[in-house]
Amino acid sequence: MSEDKRISNAKLGALVLAGLLFLVFSLYMIGKNQNIFGSSIIVIAEVEEVNGLLPGNNVRFKGMDVGTVSGIDMITDSTIHVKMLIHKSMVPFILKNAKTTINSDGLMGNKIIQIHPMDGSSAPIEVGDILYPLEQLDTDRLMEQLGSSGDALELTLQNLAEITGKFNQSEALWSLLADPALSQEIKSTLGEFKKAGNQAAQLAREGKEMIAEFRGGEGIMNTLFLDTLESQKLENSLTQLQNAATEASNLLNQLNQVVADIESEKGTAGMLISDSVVKSQIERTLENVEKSTANFNENMEALKSNFLFRRYFKKKEKEAGDHN
């Protein structure tokens, strides 16, 4: 009888011990926030750094806890796979194109994996799917940049303080700034700048109006510059004027030669015009012809220097040079 009692006590002790072990294991798993009794699937998050993430940390989607981290495996020197247990009830809402980030639960809380939905259509996640990380600014790198920016700002403030101190110690600078004559000159200079700006603006407006009138008008300027046919006629007229000037110059040379022959009393003409009255009349006539020719040549030179005909005469000079 005592033997049976010992066996019963042993069985009872073993049962109590097993129950205690199961209770301890359950409490441990609950403390690690593992999904023990719920239905879930395993999904992998691929990251480069875990940043303190541990098995049992939460997995969140749109602010809700949708699972836990079940394990962390090192795949390569730059790739880490984080296994996540995702509740099956949340599977239809998490798509394959979702991205993941490792964040902190609050300011100083535990690390969590945050699943971010992305734009575009995709199928819901399945067992063994891999979710890739979302590019984000590393906190450590951000702190380094803030530290370097703070150092640069501190140096800038020191330089500014030195410059301000030098300004405060400079009596010549303050006396110059306090000089009323300098202030008046600066005001006068600014007034001149303003006046010059207004004049430039007015000149630009007038030039714009003149160009508009030139383009839309029907005067000689518009005709000369924009009408090809009239421009060709003008070139022909200038050519005829230049030829007439050349012929007039040749005629003047011939008349000078005739006058020279007459003055030397050569030939019948010299004998007929030896009379002083007739001779003086002829000389006055030749002087008038010479003055007219000089005036004509002067007008031609003025036309050559005019901006309306300058291009034409340069073109003619170039053609004459090519022929020579």
Image: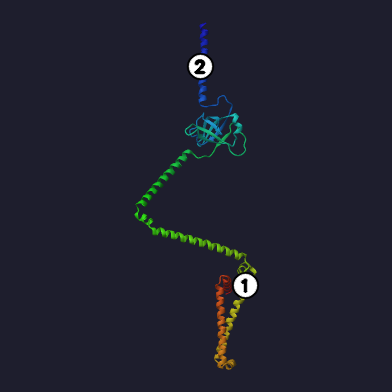
Placement of 188 over or under 148, stated as above or below = below
Q: Please report the residue visible at 46 percent of the width from the left and 38 percent of the height from the top.
A: 140
Q: Name the residue under label 1.
A: 234
Q: Which residue lies furthest to the top in this view?
A: 1
User: Considering the image in quadrants, where does the C terminus appear?
Assistant: bottom right
**105 horizontally vs 223: left or right:** left
Tag 1 secondary structure: helix
**5 horizontally vs 244: left or right:** left
Q: Quadrant of residue 263?
A: bottom right
Q: Quadrant of residue 233?
A: bottom right
Question: Sequence-wise, which precedes: disc 1 or disc 2?
Answer: 2
Placement of 149 over or under 10, stated as above or below = below
Residue 8's spot in the image, x, y percent? 53, 10
Mark nearest the camera among 1 and 2 is 1
Q: How crowded is mark 1: few (under 14 residues within 10 Å), some or many (20 or more)?
A: some
Tell me the kind of residue under disc 1.
Answer: Leu
CA distance separating discs 1 and 2: 123 Å
Q: Name the residue under label 2.
A: 17
Q: Please report the residue visible at 47 percent of the width from the left and 40 percent of the height from the top.
A: 142
Tag 2 secondary structure: helix
Tell me the kind of residue under disc 2.
Answer: Leu
Q: Please report the residue visible at 52 percent of the width from the left and 8 percent of the height from the top.
A: 5
Residue 20's spot in the image, x, y percent? 51, 18
Q: Nearer the viewer, residue 274 or 285?
A: 285
**227 horizontally vs 260: left or right:** right
Placement of 33 over or under 291, stated as above or below = above
Q: Which residue lies furthest to the right in this view?
A: 229
Q: How crowded is mark 2: few (under 14 residues within 10 Å), some or many (20 or more)?
A: few
Q: Which of 77 and 156 is in front in this view?
A: 156
Q: Please report the residue visible at 56 percent of the width from the left and 87 percent of the height from the top.
A: 284
Q: Which of 198 and 20 is in front in this view?
A: 198
